[in-house]
Amino acid sequence: MKDFRLDAIESLHIFGRTNGCAYPLTLFWSGSGIEMNLKAGEVWLEVETDYGPLEPWIAVLVDDALVSRQMLPKGRYWLPILRSMDAEIPHNVKILREVQAMHDDPASYLQIHAVRTDGSFLPLPPKQGKIEFIGDSLTSGEGTVGAQKEMQWNSMVFSSVFDYAFQTANRLHADFRIVSQSGWGFLSSWDGNPACNIPQYYEQVCGVLQGTHNAALGAFAPYDFAGWQPDVVSICLGANDASAFGKPAVYRDEKAGRLFAQKQNADGTPEAASRARLESAITAFGRKIRRCNPQAHILWVCGLLKTEIDSILREAVETYVAETADKHTSLFMLPVADTATMGSREHPGYACHKAAAEQLAVEIKHYL
Amino acid sequence: MKDFRLDAIESLHIFGRTNGCAYPLTLFWSGSGIEMNLKAGEVWLEVETDYGPLEPWIAVLVDDALVSRQMLPKGRYWLPILRSMDAEIPHNVKILREVQAMHDDPASYLQIHAVRTDGSFLPLPPKQGKIEFIGDSLTSGEGTVGAQKEMQWNSMVFSSVFDYAFQTANRLHADFRIVSQSGWGFLSSWDGNPACNIPQYYEQVCGVLQGTHNAALGAFAPYDFAGWQPDVVSICLGANDASAFGKPAVYRDEKAGRLFAQKQNADGTPEAASRARLESAITAFGRKIRRCNPQAHILWVCGLLKTEIDSILREAVETYVAETADKHTSLFMLPVADTATMGSREHPGYACHKAAAEQLAVEIKHYL
Amino acid sequence: MKDFRLDAIESLHIFGRTNGCAYPLTLFWSGSGIEMNLKAGEVWLEVETDYGPLEPWIAVLVDDALVSRQMLPKGRYWLPILRSMDAEIPHNVKILREVQAMHDDPASYLQIHAVRTDGSFLPLPPKQGKIEFIGDSLTSGEGTVGAQKEMQWNSMVFSSVFDYAFQTANRLHADFRIVSQSGWGFLSSWDGNPACNIPQYYEQVCGVLQGTHNAALGAFAPYDFAGWQPDVVSICLGANDASAFGKPAVYRDEKAGRLFAQKQNADGTPEAASRARLESAITAFGRKIRRCNPQAHILWVCGLLKTEIDSILREAVETYVAETADKHTSLFMLPVADTATMGSREHPGYACHKAAAEQLAVEIKHYL
Amino acid sequence: MKDFRLDAIESLHIFGRTNGCAYPLTLFWSGSGIEMNLKAGEVWLEVETDYGPLEPWIAVLVDDALVSRQMLPKGRYWLPILRSMDAEIPHNVKILREVQAMHDDPASYLQIHAVRTDGSFLPLPPKQGKIEFIGDSLTSGEGTVGAQKEMQWNSMVFSSVFDYAFQTANRLHADFRIVSQSGWGFLSSWDGNPACNIPQYYEQVCGVLQGTHNAALGAFAPYDFAGWQPDVVSICLGANDASAFGKPAVYRDEKAGRLFAQKQNADGTPEAASRARLESAITAFGRKIRRCNPQAHILWVCGLLKTEIDSILREAVETYVAETADKHTSLFMLPVADTATMGSREHPGYACHKAAAEQLAVEIKHYL
């Protein structure tokens, strides 16, 4: 058996936004990780992690079948991945971070240092396109693990491999990167915190994180858009913005200098000014995405859960197109979870994400 | 957090045949393990394992949803199971050995010593019946993990939680124990080794194992049938016996003093004498099962894979009933895997096992 | 081509309760009809029907695949069933009445006179048991046809071949007869009409019908229980009784000499006396069924829709067993329709009935 | 009730290529028919049909749920379609020809004259695009009806509503027309008859038909492409061409003046010249389709069954693009039937067509 530093493996594919360093490789976002083709009887992985309440989990896929999924203990150590394989048969191995970037746990990080194996690496076929998925809990795969009655918010209920984003990309043999945070929106969090919006952090490597260690790892550095220009940017955001209408005003909007509130009319519909503020956040994010990704098709995605964002998003995108004359943008509707396809935490389960990925893959293929 | 020796947890349920000792608890067979109800924010498990080529894997189910499945490194250590749970909400936790007893790896064993938690144990509802499942690779869940093209025989492709046996018992809230070995039959292995038959080891705790360490763990001691009398014994065996017809005679039949051979006629059908020998092994096993389990319903199960055993088994069971006047026995046919439900190693996949369990549970409910 | 009067076809199987006459054969109940095995290039059927608002429909199954389903115009005429078949290949043909006996249309009847074919009839294998299904709209297959949004009550939305009863029997190669009426219960209709209960008509050929023509056809004659003793009587009734609690008292209870009312407590639960009255109707029906079918297993079935009848039925059956010491009776729970498996008129759709039949067939097999 | 000649119904939608006449309306191709929105208690249809061995069948969909499917007797008569509907609720009604244009039955035709109803017609929403589907038995829905063991080729086993083409169009609320013939290809039939190719008849209304009556009905007249320009032409053809390689030369190729033969090499692969001939037929058909449909996206579709056409088609399309610089053309792969989704006559069943339509609809939506 021989050890290979990650930056010394020529034919390694890296998923996810990085700080530019492959030794160690920091896995910031949901679905970040590595892919290798190898002929080997045995494979180990040297990982390093620390955290407070929200530990990382990883998944291992062999020839695209999920074979293990596990919580990682703290420390730096070698983890067995494959044993007693036929060393004459080539295998594709993917090791992915299962949980999202954990805003709520400043101590949380996960790194891969090296691979130990008795085998040899083989070339990987080139990826057929690049997709960036932006979103909230739906794009973080929240609810795809756990019993339907499970309501606790913790690492266990998150999965990237059961999520529509990974499945869509994998069907297309495409590279993908995820930028997502549970509970966040275009403008605020589900309970009306205006600090919890995705757009303000979009241009950093992983700006949603907190803590000095993550700062040292480069999470807050500008992200190198030029180094990875996606063919498609898919945004599935807004469910939390829809939820924020009518929530009590308890978070301060620093920019505005007052409490943040998305108001409702007496009949429960969004107040016009609040709705306009949300639409304005959407169109502004559209312009930012376009600026960062000049060649990409921008795909606005609804569905998985039924919320009030659908019509608001539709209008905002029409406004965006009218204002910018951007021709490379469109809307796409995913299926919505029902009793049979619902997962834990009242979020769509794997069956719903799978159905969504089947349709989204056909759609996205056009833009690759 | 506090540590609890396994033998000190009052409301612990243990799955699988044991050597009678709960500290440490040795998990011999596929599907053996523990079940707890607890209110806890965090749970750890102290495990101990060693092995040669065939390492053990475990699965963790929380409220009957599979949340993790992983290979275990060698040694004795604490493994994190649950973190950041809501300590006010009761949860059902099952931790099961995923792989079968490994005849081919004399060094292989797995034990649980203790549970560490900040929470408290709750009573478990009584099990609604007891089922013993006897079988081969099908009952070991071989092929329920891994890509369809995966052909390597190793620990990774085995799973007890994806297997029909666990799923049947779990639907019925029944206790269950598995006695199974991949490649083995009523009379011989798939390639005609007469030493590899289940019946001769049925009365030992785990007689299919090898090695001095397993001997020291009590694997070869007589099994205490009186301590756990099943309501149903379900036998899904014979696919390998069907495969043995016509295989070259290379294994010595020690009892007979000559090479063992199950012959075929020129047209490929089983030779009459060989077929009679197999039927005789089946009826003899029936009598042994009855002697060991006087009150149980004996259920002979076919299906999952389509083999020649179906008609042979049917005749043998008819003979058994005629000879013994045993009224508490019957045959049951499970669905057979097709292209869409096939798993790895040309064995039925999870979809097939799930469909089988739905039907088998309804059938077995009658005898509980 | 040659015409065969139905009473002249030796190897014909007749489904459903009849008036004893096979020429013409009157199809009273849902799922009544004929079955033939034949080698033929062409098959016609001579039918006769009349009706007011609620016309009959029939379904044709060839080798158990549904090939046609159609509304029947009024009159007596020849209907083409099969054409251009390979006359050398034997086929199994079933022609079934799709709609229930129509209480609300006194003019409605359907008869088969004869079969015209260029082929020859073959023997039918003997049926493997006999099942009587008693029920309401669920057993009449209401809602198994039509869009989910369809709410109109008419013949179109009924089907016997999509119904759990036919599918259960057909999986078991069993004969079956249905006694069912949409909206009726053990004690009253869904809106509290005490004249609309199944038990009072159970001993007639088809007592739920009305009209002088149906009288002349023998609908109200005593049913010949001795001529067809079922192995299992399956009763799926009570959803309408559950609905009747709290409905305004507008129907006169002739026996009691006052308006009929099943009352509710202030909290919406059934009033004790009303609940007792319903349980009493259930146990009385159990005794009547037992008297008419001394050897049958009586199976009380819940599910398909979620209603308040479950616990009431459970108690009533316990009472029945306590009072009668009847050992040949049990309860069985079917799956319940969800968003994905719901059909028209807020009734379970085909997917729900199919899942129910898979489980019910395994259960009923024990009693055949 | 009032009768409406078909040409007098303002808001009627007609599916399928026609001879330009709506009274009577001749339904030539699979999936041709009519669509109406109406508020009505009752609806009848005046049909006229004659045939030899291959009778037409029709399907009725109410609000997109299939409610009846039936063989039509010969003659001109009124057929009941809907009864006892709620006349206050609008319903969408589609009546479609289930079977393909029957080349093998020169006497076969089907016409609709009029609608009888007590209700009133409502406007239909405009169709969202137009799709032409060209194909063979797969596009004729052969095998979507009947048991898997059914092998007889007759009208019964065809269905347009279970077919991927209708389902794709219907999901998209698009208009559609089918041009298809079972057993035919780009160049020849499955057994090597060069007269049985689709391209030569593409520019006629329904040139694949035969017989003087069909001639009188205008089947062989030039088709009016200008009157209905599709957004997409989807071609799923070639499975029969793949089958023709190696078939004995028994059909005369009139143009070439010799027996037609698509030869194989000794190893069973297509002979180079024969393969080139097929590719040439494909590219020629591409040019013809483009000429007839200047604005359409041309979509070449593979799948449903696994045949050798895939690679040949891919090369031919690349050649076509290279030769013509046509930018509005692409390939699309549909899922392939497996054991579980296979229908009768070894053709894909409804489950396979449904899965195909889900994917094809997403693809085609881009070009509408």
Image (tube, coloured by chain):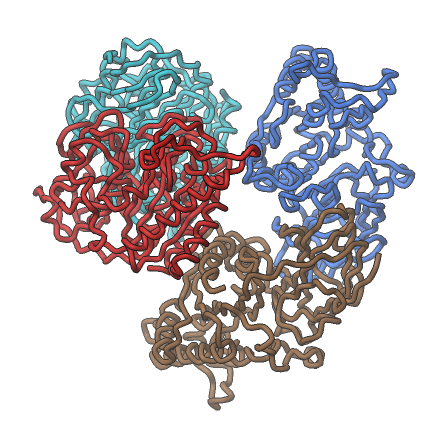
Chain colours: A blue, B brown, C red, D cyan
Report the number of discs: 0
Q: Tell me: residue B143, above or below residue D337.
A: below
The residue most toward the bottom is B257
Of residue A226 and residue B361, the one placed in the foreground of this image is: B361
Q: Is residue B192 above or below residue A97?
A: below
Looking at the figure, which quarter contains the N terminus of chain C? top left
Relative side of B180 to C123, left or right: right
Which of the two residues, C98 or C253, is positioned nearer the viewer here?
C253
Q: Quadrant of residue D110?
A: top left
- x and y percent of residue C267 in the render? 57, 34
Q: Is residue B286 visible?
A: yes
Point out residue B208 in the picture as x, y percentages from the top left corner: 59, 76
Taking C282 as reference, is A337 left or right? Answer: right
Residue C66 drawn at (x, y percent): 30, 41
D240 sits left or right of D249 in the view: right
Query: Is residue B91 shown above or below D196?
Result: below
The extreme left residue here reads C2
Q: Tell me where residue B56 sits by quadrant.
A: bottom right
| Residue A161 shown left or right of residue B185 in the figure | right
Q: Quadrant of residue C297?
A: bottom left
Can you say which quadrant of the picture contains the C terminus of chain C?
bottom left
> Is residue D56 in sight in this rendering?
no
Q: Residue at x 35, y 60 (%)?
A: C367
Residue A363 pos. (x, y %): 57, 29
